[in-house]
Each structure stands twice: as structure tokens, then as C-alpha cells.
Image (cartoon, rainbow, N blue to C red):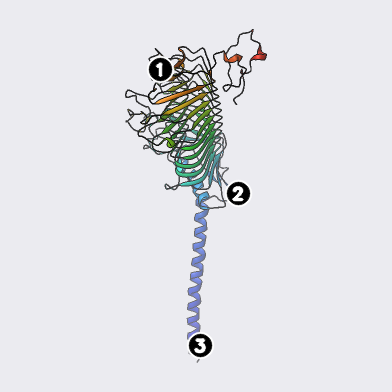
Amino acid sequence: MAWIHSRDEGKNWKKRKFYIIIFVFLIALDALIVYILIQSNPPDVPSNSIVWVAGDGSGNFTCDGIDDQVEINQALAYVAENPQLTTVYLKGPNTYVLSDTVFVGNETILEGDPAAVIKLIDHADWPVFKPMITQINSTGIHNVTVKGFEIDGNHDNNLDKKKGYGYYNMIHFRNCSDIRVHDMYMHDGHGEGLKVDNGYNITFYKNRINKTGHNGLFAENCQYVYGWDNNITVRTDSGFRLRNSNHVKIYDNEIDSFYHWSAGGAGILIEKTTGVVNDIEVYNNTIQKTYGPGIWLIGCFQSYPRDDAKNVHIYSNMFKSTGTNPTIDWVGGIVTSGFYDTLIENNTFDGVYHGAVIQMYPTGGTHIYPTYNNSGHIDLSPKGTGYTTIVRNNIIANTRQRSKDPAGTGYGVINYLPETHTIVLDNNCLYNNFAGNYLNCTSTTDIYIDPLFLNEDIGAGYSLEEHPKDINQTIISSAFRRMC
């Protein structure tokens, strides 16, 4: 019996020894996992749901100026994997150099100090359509905010790529919703400031955009797009470009350009090719010295129902000296074709080139530069008839001849397409336009006096650079008036 008892004790000890080994192994494995997590993730995450990235060791992730997208992406991935976290914050002053793309996840805020700069590396040599900032999931993204910091496209140290051909877009989201980009400084790039494809509820505001290389905001096939309080200096294309996008409001922006071959096209470009574009408002903007038109509306490529391209409302804007490009003829204040029932009212056009409102489209194989390919020589003619533009309660003054083929230009309002397009004029104030007031259109209700002496609520405010000293200021109801 003693022998049996001893044998049972031996069996029990072997079982206990086995369990002890398993237990020790599990403890060791757990310790290894904790060690790996500590090494690859922030040692501590602040209770305010922000993950900090810095260059001086004060953040949860530290960048050293080389391949800084690695640490930024680690921080963004950590936020994406932890629902209680919301924000990756780039601390400044510091320059974060990117040799590859930064990837943002859903429900994420990418924020930074004004002195925090994301900069493209010298001689990046990225392929076309590879952006500086985009989404983690290529199928879609939602509820993302990018705000507060600076993006330097480092154009001059990447001169092997052409502007406007899809290289080095600063921010690019596809199949997205609830995207907010604001309080950013984006400059000196090759491509877009923000490019959005197939987006819903896009807001772009309080940004400073200087020579991005294509558009400040390019919204393609988007619904509900809002852009306000931006200051944009255009290079290569437009301040805002809206292609087949609808339910759009662009307002309270300041848009300008500079005199150079790369200075771009329109301040605001609205395109209709395949989508529905029938709910657009553009108001309270100051657009000046653009290389191309102040605003360009173009409907083309195919015929479409009337309801698919109508009701663009442009009002209470100030156009000053727009259309300086010496190499194209489609310059002016507002150039339009292919849209029905466009309403242009309470704007002021002062010293624009060619004409204030012009119905025309680029013809004769004009190369629409830039494009994402080399097929810039395209047919931009509208394919229908009965297009109407209503022009009322505007001030149109001091219109000049355009630089290219100036003969016969400098009218206040011009219709080069009278067989298919009509301009209806009502209660506008026209004054001192170089070639006269109208070409292929007329009005019975317009007035023709110096707008400084208007006692009517017409236009969006008007002033000359120098006023005669003997003007009675009490009767100048329009001078220096803020936009409606």
C-alpha cells in the first residue's frame, strides 16, 4: 500500500510540475507582449485623448527630421486602433520631413501648432497621384479634421516634376464624408492643396494658400462643399475648382494671383461634364489680379438636360483687374458657357480685362493647361441651346482691353455666342468701359453714371484708388461700402 501511495504522489507531482511550467510560460509570454507594446507604442497616453508628436523628445513619439512619416504614422495608427483617442498633435516649432505618405484613419483629428511644418523631402521622386497626406483605408474615410499647421510642398527642390499633373498633392481623400480642413498654411507645391473625389460634406475654411501648384481646393463629384474665409494666391490652375459637384457655397474668400506664366487660370472654376450642377452659390468674395477669369463656368463634352446645369448664383462679389494673362483670350470677370439660368447680381467689376461678363468658351484648339495628361486640346463647346445668363444690379466700370488680340475688346458685357446664349440685363450701372457697354446684347434699364455718385444699392462696394479732392463725400453712398 505504501508503494501505491508513493506512486500516486509521483503522478501528482508531475502534474503540478507541468502546470507550474505552463503558468511560468504564460507569465513570460505576457511580459514579452507588454514589453513589445511599450517599445512600439507611447509609454503613456494623456487623459485628454491626444497623442503628441514632437521633435524635442517632449511627445509620445519623437521625430528626428529623417523619415518623419514613420513616427507620425505610428501615432495615427495608434489613434485609429484605440477608439478613446481622437487626435494626433504635431508640436512646434519643428519641421517634419516626409519621404513617404502620411496615412489618416477614420474619426481622427490631425492637428498641429502654426509653427509645426510638414515638408516634402528634397528630390522625392514620387510617382504621380501619390499625395503627402491621405487615408489609411483606400476604400473610404469619414469624419476627419486636418487643422492648424503648415504644409510646405518644397517645390523648388523637386523641379523634376511638372506642376498640375498630379504630383505631390498635399491632402487627397477619396470616397469620403465629413472632411474638415481649416486654419492651415499650404504653399509652394506641385499639385492640389486639398483634392477630394466622391466626397460628401466637405468644409474648407480659414486657410492660407500660396502657390500650391494646381488648385487650393479641387472637389470632384462631391456633394455639399463649403469654402469660406480662405486667402488664396493661385498658381497653375484655380483657387477653387468644382467639377461635377453640387450643393456648393463659396463665400468670404480673398483670391488673387501674380503676373507670371505659371500664375494659373480662374479664381473659381465651376465645371459641368457628367454630373448634376444646379445648386451653386458664390458670394462675398474679393477676386483680383487673376491670370485667367475671376470666375469661369464651363459646361461641355455632351448634351444634358436643362436641370443638370442651372441656377448658379453669383452675387455680392468684388472683381478687380481680373484676366491679366497675355497669352489667352478667355479672360475677364466672369466667363460662362453651357449653363442655364445663371444669376449674376450685386457684384462690382472694376478694371477687369476684356469684359465683366462674357459668354464664350476657349476655341481653336486652345490648350487648357494644366491637365493630368497631355490631352489638353479638347472641345469645350456646349452642345445645347437656350442658355440664359441674368445680369442685374451690378457695377461694371473701367473695363480694359485684353492683352491677347485686344482689338474689339474692353466692353462691359459681351456675348460671343448669340445663337445659343442670351444675356438679360437689368438695372446695372456701367461707366467708363473702354470699348463701350455692350457687344451682342443690350438693356433698357441700365444706368450710366460714375458709380461713386450712386444713390442706389447696386454692386458690392466700389472705390477708386484716388478720389478727386473736391468730391462731396456725403453723397457717395457706394464708396468704401463693405460687401453686402
Local crowd size for mark 2, using a 10 Å CA cut-off: few (<14), some (14–19), many (≥20): few
The quarter of the rendered structure image containing the C terminus is: top right
Local crowd size for mark 3, using a 10 Å CA cut-off: few (<14), some (14–19), many (≥20): few
- Are the residues at dot 1 and dot 2 in contact (C-beta closer than 8 Å)? no
The Cα–Cα distance between marks 1 and 2, rounded to whole angstroms, is 57 Å
Q: Secondary structure at mark 1?
A: loop
The residue that mark 2 highlights is 46
Residue 464 visible in this rendered orientation of the protein: no
Q: Amino acid at mark 3?
A: His
**Closer to the camera, 481 or 127?**
481
Q: Secondary structure at mark 2?
A: loop
Q: Nearer the viewer, mark 1 or mark 2?
A: 1
Location of residue 162 in the rendering, given as x and y in whole percent from the top left corner? 37, 29
The residue that mark 1 highlights is 326
**Closer to the camera, 464 or 388?**
388
Q: Earlier in the sequence, mark 1 or mark 2?
A: 2
The residue lying at 47 percent from left, 78 percent from top is: 14
Left or right: residue 129 compared with residue 72: left
Query: Which quadrant would residue 206 be assigned to in this image?
Result: top right
